[in-house]
Amino acid sequence: MSSQHAVIIGGSSGIGLATAAHLLEKGYRVTITGRDAAKLRAAAESLDGDVATITMDAADFTSLAGCFETIGPLDHLVLALGGGNGGGPFATVDLADLRKGFEQKTMAHFACAQASLPYLSKDGSITFVSAVSAQAAMPGTAGLAAVNAAIAALAPVLAAELKPIRVNCISPGVVDTPWWDFLGEDQKAPAFAGFAGRTPVGRVGRPEEIADAIGFLVGNGFTSGHTLICDGGIRLGQ
């Protein structure tokens, strides 16, 4: 696998960083990107293997062509971009905040995948990272569901349009990553306990578990156009 180059957009923390570690362990050459150069360097120093970094704002669409030119040829693109804009009760969702959610996550996924095409191997793959809000009917998440469902909708269309490039999507549930740090420790622990109580496996997920699922989508040459839900069953509404 040492000749296989995987690029992880949003690879400096959380699911993206765990995916970088997983693919490096499998023998891939990995490039991780992020907006914060210092955070990106620290992430790279925490990894073991053939890893490179490039500072990149995936929502700055005018810069993407140059960034991918710098990255050069790649075999696999993983779009591990987070986003939390657009949440809240439907009746009061701020439309400007919802628009920001689409721009920073849906549009960024779309634009990065598009910009990668001149450099992406025809035997390669694109893996989008959506979220289980797209599949679960959870009150207060209509905006988040719309943002993430739009990402998941890309996988089958692009799998057909870009063949033989494989295109898939991973839809994680509640995962213990820095994305949740906005709550603070005093709020995060009870929130996670609540989610765990609604999840058949009885806990929230770990980034490494999502990374393992992404690794399957990257490595399995007979899987395309698929959204893999890795949520501990929380979408079942227990």
Image (tube, grey):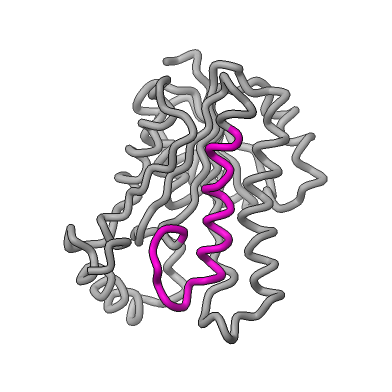
Using the image as rendered, state which of residue 216 and residue 179 is in the foreground: 216
Residues 82 and 52: in front is: 82
Residue under the image location 35 percent in, 80 percent down: 187
Q: Is residue 49 visible?
A: yes
Q: Is residue 13 above or below residue 45?
A: below
Q: Quadrant of the N terminus?
A: top left
Horizontal arrangement in the rendering, residue 182 relative to residue 94 (left or right): left
Residue in the picture at 41% in, 27% down:
223
The single residue placed furthest to the right in the displayed view is: 62
* Residue 150 drawn in magenta: yes
Residue 224, given in percent of the width and then of the height, sits at: 47, 29
User: Residue 59 placed where, x, y %?
Assistant: 71, 53
**Position in image of residue 104 (x %, y %):** 66, 58
Q: Which residues are magenta?
A: 134-158
Q: Residue furthest bottom?
A: 92
Location of residue 114 with respect to 69 vertically, above or below: below
Q: Quadrant of the C terminus?
A: bottom left
Residue in front for this viewpoint, 162 or 177: 162
